[in-house]
Image (cartoon, rainbow, N blue to C red):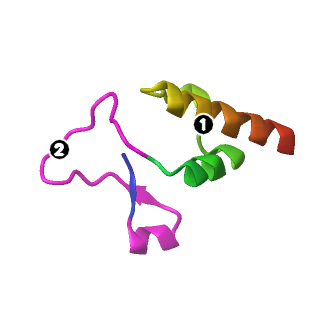
Amino acid sequence: MAFNIPAASRNSQTEHRPCLGWAPVGRVCISIDADCLARLMASHQIHVQEFSCDDEASKQVVRGLLLDCLRLR
């Protein structure tokens, strides 16, 4: 995982900085606001193939967000 470092960001660089000895794993579970997810999907910064939903309600929200994104094209 890359973190933007203020000085490095000015030079368009990112740097991997392990935090207290953690090591990246294959998957993480997070919760994200639906509006934020919609913005990420609309700007092509995240794609539905890159994540999964743990419950049916979340799947329905993601389907709706995806349909909204497709209508805006």
The quarter of the picture where the C terminus appears is: top right
Q: Mark 1, residues whose alpha carbon is within 10 Å: few (<14), some, or many (≥20)?
A: some
**Label whose residue precedes the other's in the sequence (1 or 2):** 2
Question: What is the span of residues highlighted in magenta in the rendered image?
Answer: 5-31
Is 62 left or right of 53, judged from the image as shown?
right
Q: Tell me: 7 left or right of 35.
A: left
Q: Nearer the viewer, mark 1 or mark 2?
A: 1
Work out whether residue 27 or residue 35 is closer to the camera in this orientation and state it: 35
Name the element at disc 1. Answer: helix
Magenta region's main secondary structure?
Answer: loop
Q: Is residue 9 left or right of residue 39?
A: left
Q: Is residue 73 visible?
A: no
Label 2 is placed on what type of residue?
Trp
* Residue pointed to by mark 2: 22
Q: Position of residue 72 (x, y in %)?
A: 84, 45
Is 20 within the magenta?
A: yes
What residue is pinned by disc 1?
A: 61
